[in-house]
Amino acid sequence: MFSHPDYQRGFDWTEFLSGILFILISVYFFSRPVVALGSLVVITALIAIVRGIVNLSSYTKFRAIMPVSWLLVVAAVLDIIIGLLFLFDTALGSLTIAYLFGFWFLIDAITGLLTSGHLRTFGGGWFAISVIFDILALALGVMMILQPALAAYTLVFIVTWFLLVAGLNHIVIAFARR
């Protein structure tokens, strides 16, 4: 059991309230996936803009010690441009995120297929299962690239389920700390 002289037990209201908030957001996102996708695009845009600003501020620190510090400026400008594009054109952001998600599945599946040979040493069954799952992932990746709306809604579905599970976990933690 965790024991520290400064730790005080008690119901954790911040965990509980954040859990309730996560669950409410997930329920809202389940009922309005288009809003969820737009929210993900805006969050991605804001992260890109903040990252660009951070890279610009880092440039002055690294300019003297890193010969390729100019790459920080290039990355920063690209981050800010992408962030602004996504922020002001959520349809473009949605489509871009959808394609990235599809390509991620595709690349991961191809990598899995190319590297699954080592599983034969653990038994042919493991190798066969891995190949089957990688082929399914490959098919899903191709489908997502051909149907970007599927990729976008898959992403929304995964994020929404994550919010629900995380919310439930926060509530459990709130009660556990009593």
Image (cartoon, grey):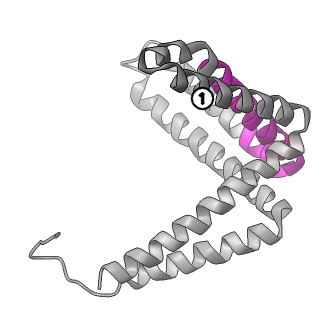
Residue at which label 1 appears: 129
In the image, residue 109 above or below residue 178: above
- The image shows residue 127 at horizontal and vertical percentages of 55, 21
Q: Specify the quadrant that holds the C terminus.
A: bottom left
114 magenta-colored? no
In the image, residue 157 above or below residue 17: above
How many numbered tags mark residues here? 1
Which of 142 and 136 lies nearest the eye of the viewer?
136
Residue appearing at x 81%, y 52% in the figure:
153
Tell me if 103 is positioned left or right of 16 in this view: right
> Could you tell me what secondary structure mostly forms the magenta stretch?
helix
Residue appearing at x 85%, y 60% in the figure:
34
- The image shows residue 176 at horizontal and vertical percentages of 33, 79
In the image, residue 31 above or below residue 68: below
Q: Is residue 91 in view?
A: yes
87 magenta-colored? yes
Q: Is residue 93 in view?
A: no
In the image, residue 163 above or below residue 95: below
Residue appearing at x 83%, y 36% in the figure:
144
- The image shows residue 141 at horizontal and vertical percentages of 77, 31
Residue appearing at x 85%, y 34% in the figure:
143
Q: Which residues are magenta?
A: 82-111
Which of 54 and 36 lies nearest the eye of the viewer?
36
